Image (tube, rainbow, N blue to C red):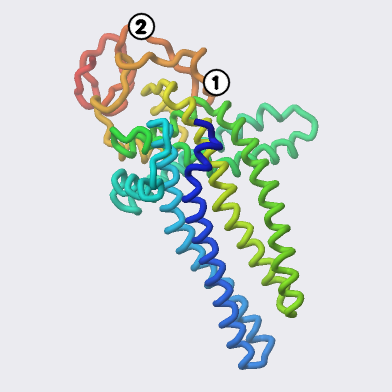
């Protein structure tokens, strides 16, 4: 199933997101009218200025409650349905209801989802900075390197929001294990396929920038024309135009980009071999990943072992040399790390010297 097919069949999520955005704008306009009406009673420009600042503060709170709580749960449901689609090969009917049920079943409460999302976002961001340093070193000798490096990091930062949703999507795709463990797996899969995924991310970032500029311009012409006819503040028109543009971006542009990124991610995820070595290396690179890995409660029964999956060889792995490192091929079918506590193992060891777990 193509990304376009998935996007069209999950459009109900986009309409819900658009509804939340429009509700946000309506509340903001009503608050503006009320506060400006109060300022007219005092017939003072100073009071009008104070009310304008009060309005900006209040709409920030409204935006946070609507978009960063209710909107976040809608996006979680969208991610869940996309993951289910790649697993089952078809988009479920009544996708909004299915997505809501999946989020509730997987995480129980919204707070649990927010906690894992925060850890995943932090881990990807820290890994992104590492990849950014690699890019900087590769571009350092080129003319105009500083400008090129700034542009590259700018695109990486924009793509971050879509990459962490891909990693979270893996928690729904791999729902037969602990959510924290699946989230760790999702980040590792991104780390092992960073080159291919960042190619998608670069085009994604460019599309987002161009689309947002076009939508903002159209929205400003709309609000600016109406406010000019009524003699109202051009600044307020600009703020409302930005809000409308951001709503359209959030509802449709972000959704399309998320589907595109998840499509590329889910194409490589099932084929990616995960080894314990990379968990240890990522834990050293990212404190957030280390926290998430600790909370996964991994045991020998849940961690993939070399007897279950082949270890990634330097030819198979796509990780940058010298930063996270290539994986070492093994032929003795024994893990290099304790599957319970992660302690490095030496040849011939029968029990882990740290926790006493018997080695396979």
Label 2 Cα crowd, 10 Å radius (few <14 / some 14-19 / many 20+):
few
Q: Residue at x 79, y 35 (%)?
A: 144
Which residue is at the far bottom? 42
Per the image, the residue denoted by label 1 is 321
Compared with residue 85, is residue 240 higher up or lower down, i.e. above or below?
Answer: below
Spot the residue most to the right.
Answer: 143
In front: label 2 or label 1: 2
Residue at x-position 73% and y-position 58%: 217
Spot the residue most to the front: 93
Q: Residue 149's image quarter?
A: top right
Q: Is residue 23 visible?
A: yes
346 versus 2 height, above or below: above
- Which residue occupies the foreground of this view, 189 or 66? 66
Residue 338 vs residue 211, the one in the foreground: 211
Query: How many numbered marks have been drawn onto this rendered protein structure?
Result: 2
Whether residue 212 sits left or right of residue 231 in the image: it is: left
356 sits to left or right of 24: left
Of the numbered discs in the image, which one, if any, rests on residue 331? 2
Say left or right for 20 vs 41: left
The reply to whether residue 287 is visible in this rendering is no
Which residue is depicted at the point 24% across and 25% down? 300
Q: Taking 184 as reference, is 359 left or right?
A: left
> Relative to 333, is 36 above or below?
below
Q: Position of residue 214 (x, y in %)?
A: 71, 52
Q: Residue at x 62, y 77 (%)?
A: 52
Label 1 neighbour load within 10 Å: few <14, some 14-19, many 20+:
few
Relative image position of residue 151 (x, y in whole percent): 70, 40
Mark 2, secondary structure of its residue: loop
């Amino acid at each position: 199933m193509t990304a376009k097919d998935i996007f069209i069949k999950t459009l109900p999520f986009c309409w819900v997101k658009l509804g939340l955005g429009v509700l946000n704008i309506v509340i903001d306009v009503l608050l503006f009218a009320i506060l400006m009406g109060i300022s007219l009673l005092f017939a003072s420009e100073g009071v009008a200025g104070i009310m304008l600042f009060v309005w900006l503060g209040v709409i920030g709170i409204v935006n946070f409650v609507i978009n960063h709580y209710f909107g976040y749960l809608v996006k979680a449901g969208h991610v869940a349905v996309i993951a289910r689609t790649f697993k089952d090969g078809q988009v479920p009917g009544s996708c909004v209801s299915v997505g809501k049920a999946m989020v509730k079943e997987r995480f129980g409460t919204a707070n649990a989802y927010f906690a894992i999302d925060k850890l995943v976002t932090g881990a990807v961001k820290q890994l992104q900075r590492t990849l950014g340093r690699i890019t900087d070193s590769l571009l350092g000798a080129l003319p105009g390197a500083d400008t090129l490096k700034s542009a590259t990091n700018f695109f990486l930062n924009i793509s971050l929001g879509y990459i962490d949703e891909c990693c979270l999507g893996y928690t729904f795709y791999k729902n037969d294990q602990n959510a924290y463990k699946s989230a760790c797996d999702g980040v590792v899969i991104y780390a092992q396929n960073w080159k291919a995924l960042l190619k998608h991310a670069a085009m994604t970032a460019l599309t987002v920038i161009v689309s947002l500029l076009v939508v903002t311009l159209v929205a400003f012409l709309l609000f600016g024309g109406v406010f000019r006819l009524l003699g109202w503040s051009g600044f307020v028109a600009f703020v409302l135009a930005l809000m409308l543009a951001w709503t359209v971006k959030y509802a449709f542009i972000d959704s399309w980009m998320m589907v595109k990124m998840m499509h590329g991610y889910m194409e490589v995820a099932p084929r990616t071999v995960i080894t314990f070595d990379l968990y240890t290396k990522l834990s050293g690179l990212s404190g957030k990943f280390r926290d998430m890995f600790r909370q996964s409660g991994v045991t020998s029964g849940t961690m993939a072992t070399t007897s279950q999956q082949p270890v990634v060889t330097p030819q198979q792995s796509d990780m940058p040399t010298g930063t996270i490192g290539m994986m070492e091929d093994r032929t003795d079918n024994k893990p290099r790390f304790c599957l319970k506590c992660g302690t490095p193992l030496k040849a011939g060891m029968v029990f882990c010297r740290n926790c006493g777990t018997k080695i396979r």
